[in-house]
Amino acid sequence: MLNFFEFLHKATTKHIVSHIYLLSITYCCFFLFISSTSWAQTLADGKRDPQENVNLLQFATDLTSFVYDYPLAFHGIGENRLNQPEDYKAQYYTLELRQRLKLLENFYLKFQYEQRFYNIIEAQPGGVLESGQILGSESKDLVSRVGASIDFDSRDNRMSPLTGGFYNVSLLIANNLWGRYKMIDLRMDLRQYFALSYRSVLGVQAIVQSITGEAPFHMLAEIGNSRSMRGFNTGQYRDKKLLLVQTEYRFPIAGRIGGVVFSSVGDVESDFRNFDWREFKSSLGVGLRYNLFKGYRAKLRLDYGISNEGDRRFYIHLAEAF
């Protein structure tokens, strides 16, 4: 993985200026609000903010930034699938800034700014990505989106809940006034957790996503990642509409070690009218969990997933898949 500043150095001067300007504003906002909230402690211990029930109107800032640099495979988009996937290597970072406003008990309004810089640094010679035919395959692709979401969050713990639910509806908009693309991303994420016995829980998640307009391939709805449809290769299926349901049973084994059994069913299409349940993809798998800190639910996740097409993937991550 490249050093973050080395990565920025390789971008164009225009991108560098915009990145530095954005990061400066972001971190100023971050330090301004972190002094008046217990946000950092919430991340550290995975517990709900102890002040959330004190003030009805409450602000909290959530800043996340990721930098990736690893090999991937492009399988095509929708029905235009390639006979053989093309290997490519990309580096990108994602910066997300969210501002949360508590409206009522367990109800939140969030405003979000997101920026993704995506750069294909190595593509298969003579392939569709190298030719630039696929939207988003150009080098130094920058996408900026703004939006808002409504959340209902009654989980007893955000990192590893035993009870409660999380219901989210979000809308993100990219416009060619401030970027290359004009697109709308509407997403609904519904989660419910049922405590079956001491420290064992059944989690259920449903995701519906709809993208309209011009979206780069790397921001389309996808089947296959570390959080859903585990077992499929990353982005093995991509399109503008997504329907997905997954379940996960988590149970204790011994001490800080726990186990999981999970399954997923879903598909992507260009239009909701094209979905056919007989063509839905599925995956299942097992995993282990290790509680990193005694008394808190911060967990190391190890999962092994198998798709209905015979693909197998192994995942190592922090925190639960959902």
Image (cartoon, helix red, strand yellow):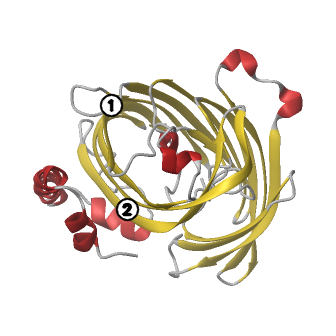
- In the current view of this chain or complex, which residue is farthest to the top? 273
Distance of label 2 from label 1 (alpha carbons): 19 Å
Q: Is mark 2 on a helix, strand or loop?
A: strand
Mark 2 lies on residue: 66
Of 101 and 75, which appears nearest the observer? 75
In the rendered image, which quarter is residue 79 located in? Answer: top right
Mark 1 lies on residue: 147
**Kind of residue at disc 2:** Phe
x and y percent of residue 284 in the render?
82, 56
Q: What is the number of the mark on residue 3?
A: none
Query: Which quarter shows the N terminus?
Result: bottom left
Q: Is residue 177 above or below residue 321?
A: above
**Kind of residue at disc 1:** Gly
Whether residue 113 is visible, yes or no, is: yes
Q: Is mark 1 on a helix, strand or loop?
A: strand
Q: Taking 271 as reference, is 318 left or right? A: left
In the rendered image, which quarter is residue 98 located in? Answer: top left
Q: Point out the tag, 2 or 1, that comes first from the N-terminus.
A: 2
Between marks 2 and 1 in the image, the one whose residue lies nearer the viewer: 2
x and y percent of residue 317 in the render?
57, 70
Crowding at label 1, few (<14), some or many (≥20) Cα neighbours within 10 Å?
some
Q: Is residue 288 above or below residue 270?
A: below
